[in-house]
Amino acid sequence: MELKESLSIIRKKIWMIAAIVLTATVLSGIYTLFYVAPTYEASTKLLVNHQDRYSDGTPMLDWNAVNTNIMLMNSYKEIIQSEAILNAVAAAHPEFGLTGKELMYYITASSSTDSQIMTVSVRDGSYERAVSIANSVAEEFRKQIPTIMKVDNVAILTAANPNDEPTQVAPNPPLTVILAFLLSSMFAIGLVFLLDYLDDTFKSESDVEKYLELPTLSLIHAIRKDDLTPKTSASATPPNQQLSNESHPIGEKSYATFNS
């Protein structure tokens, strides 16, 4: 299919494309704004930093210890999201109304490359509850890690603050509307091409010549409803208004064109 032909198909059905895109975009915006509950995120930062000390208590800067802490980060991220930690949090805080397995869907643990800082993030419909869960999980992890790993190298660097401005992470109305616009545009254009592909009627002389390889002898124009109204016969017309050529009265229209 040539580009000019494709553009012609789109131009003929531009009203359908516009209607689909407009409807999908408006509905997605209304649904996002009025029917989707907001989701908030709270984060607590943990520092993984075990240092050996000199005899006088001064911390010893040991790069091997730093690298060890960084390598342990992946293990710590798995441990903090394990049932061993989350079951203890759920038991200690029945006000959350969540089990250890359910808490897994609320919590994510992340860290930057070559960093000793781990971030525990919690998403919930209530910002206050997200703060409480994040701090409770971090504190429980800090208390249990010496028993689990036999090393006390975790400290809470920054706890989530309930007085901070809530951070809404979902929904995102502008992003939702843009995605709805793009997806509905692709769907509408695809639908237009599909309907054109399934339509096997001839619409012009060029279609006849292209698909049948035959010349057209005549072309019947579109007939309007008004054209079917009975015309006054020539006999009812006063003699002084009749034409000498009665075979083609004035006002009679031609509906067929013959090609020579």
Image (cartoon, rainbow, N blue to C red):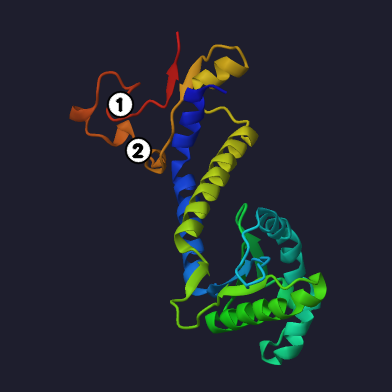
Q: Is residue 252 above or below residue 41?
A: above
Q: Earlier in the sequence, mark 1 or mark 2?
A: 2
- Residue located 70% across and 89% down the image: 93
Circle 1/circle 2 CB separation < 8 Å: yes
In the image, what residue type sits under mark 1? Answer: Pro
Let me know if residue 101 appears in the view: no
Where residue 142 sits, quadrant-wise, is bottom right
Q: Position of residue 233 (x, y in %)?
A: 34, 35
* Drawn side of residue 252 relative to residue 102, left or right: left
In the image, what residue type sits under mark 2? Answer: Lys
Residue on which the image places disc 2: 231
- The single residue placed furthest to the left in the displayed view is 240
Observer-nearest of 221 and 202? 202
Observer-nearest of 244 and 192? 192
Residue on which the image places disc 1: 249
Real-space CA distance between mark 1 and mark 2, rounded to the nearest whole angstrom: 10 Å
Q: Is residue 211 above or below residue 14?
A: above
Instruction: Identify the image quadrant of the N terminus.
Output: top right
